């Protein structure tokens, strides 16, 4: 079995970026994965020591399906975020106060009626905290999906389900349907990298959103429950040994 595709998602809820390689470190996500997010509502973040809070406190597809209409790209060399959307283009630094203010204004204007303000009128705010990831898990992990499991879902419903709905970091070829569920507690090796499989991934309403049109035109959570008796697709794994991974790399159980 091997890595068929490798992705990161620099802005929480927004565009997947296809990678050819990534350098992994123990206890950390793929570099720049979910590094940036637009906080909304009454959510409180300790800027000196940010902790995990639910994705529902941020711009996310489960709450803001129109976010799928945006196309974003983070440039590692220039550290600039490039955005294309109905509101026009923007290039700004997500690392500086000035850039974050510009990004806050852009995303808030784009969300319009979907933007969520706090009970005391607090406006949405774009955030970046060095070393922090706004991932859906309480610890920094890598998400993996066996393409055979996705194919089993597609066969059951008799229709394709775009893999981008599930926002995994690694898509695997050469596994059996649902095989990855049997790896809980096991160590996976990819070259020099090792990672321990921690848990299966519950899917949410974000998977309803078409990644091209932003329409809620399918219900994978209901489909999983109806056909398989659960709402899980994919696994979370925690990196325990550093190294580089690349598309095409073989994955082994240790």
Image (cartoon, rainbow, N blue to C red):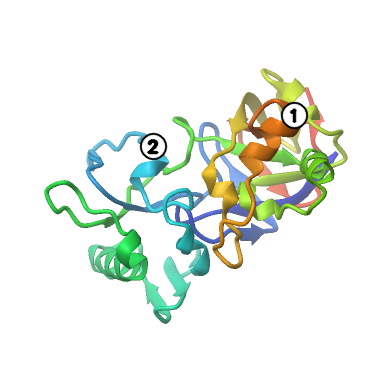
**Residue occupying the point 81% across, 31% down:** 252
Is disc 1 surrounded by few (<14), some (14 to 19) or many (20+) residues within 10 Å? few
**Mark seen at residue 80:** none
> Percent position (x, y) of residue 137?
48, 33
The residue under the point 40% across, 76% down is 91
**With respect to residue 216, does 148 lie above or below?**
above
At x 24% / y 68%, what residue is drawn?
Answer: 98
State the mark number for residue 54: 2
Residue 175 position by quadrant = top right
The CA span between labels 2 and 1 is: 26 Å
Res. 237 visible in picture: no
Q: Is residue 72 left or right of residue 183?
A: left
Residue 106 picture quarter: bottom left
The correct choice, above or below, for 208 with respect to 105 in the image is above
Q: Which structural element holds mark 2?
A: loop
Q: Position of residue 230 (x, y in %)?
A: 67, 27
| Residue 70 picture location, percent across and down | 49, 69
Dot 1 lies on which element?
helix
Quadrant occupied by the N terminus: top right
Residue 228 circle label: 1
Q: Sequence-wise, which precedes: disc 2 or disc 1?
A: 2
Q: Where is the C terminus found, in terms of image quarters?
A: top right
List x then y, in percent, for residue 223: 69, 39
């Amino acid at each position: 079995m091997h890595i068929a595709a490798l992705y990161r998602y620099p802005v929480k809820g927004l565009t997947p970026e296809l990678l050819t390689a990534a350098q992994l470190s123990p206890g950390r996500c793929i570099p720049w994965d979910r590094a940036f997010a637009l906080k909304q509502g009454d959510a409180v973040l300790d800027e000196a020591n940010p902790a995990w809070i639910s994705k529902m406190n941020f711009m996310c597809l489960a709450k803001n399906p129109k976010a799928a209409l945006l196309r974003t790209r983070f440039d590692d060399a220039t550290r600039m975020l490039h955005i294309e959307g109905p509101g026009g283009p923007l290039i700004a630094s997500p690392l500086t106060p000035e850039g974050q203010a510009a990004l806050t204004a852009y995303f808030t204007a784009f969300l319009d009626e979907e933007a969520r303000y706090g009970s005391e009128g607090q406006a949405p705010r774009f955030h970046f905290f060095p070393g922090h990831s706004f991932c859906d898990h309480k610890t920094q992990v890598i998400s993996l999906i066996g393409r055979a499991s996705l194919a089993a879902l597609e066969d059951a419903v008799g229709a394709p389900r775009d893999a981008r709905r599930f926002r995994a970091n690694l898509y695997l070829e050469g596994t059996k349907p649902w095989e990855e569920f049997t790896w809980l507690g096991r160590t996976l090796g990819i070259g020099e990298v090792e990672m321990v499989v921690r848990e299966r991934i519950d899917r949410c309403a974000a998977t309803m959103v078409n990644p091209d049109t932003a329409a809620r035109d399918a219900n994978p959570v209901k489909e999983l429950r109806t056909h398989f008796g659960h709402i899980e697709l994919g696994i979370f794994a925690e990196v325990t040994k550093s190294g580089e991974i690349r598309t095409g790399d073989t994955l082994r159980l240790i």
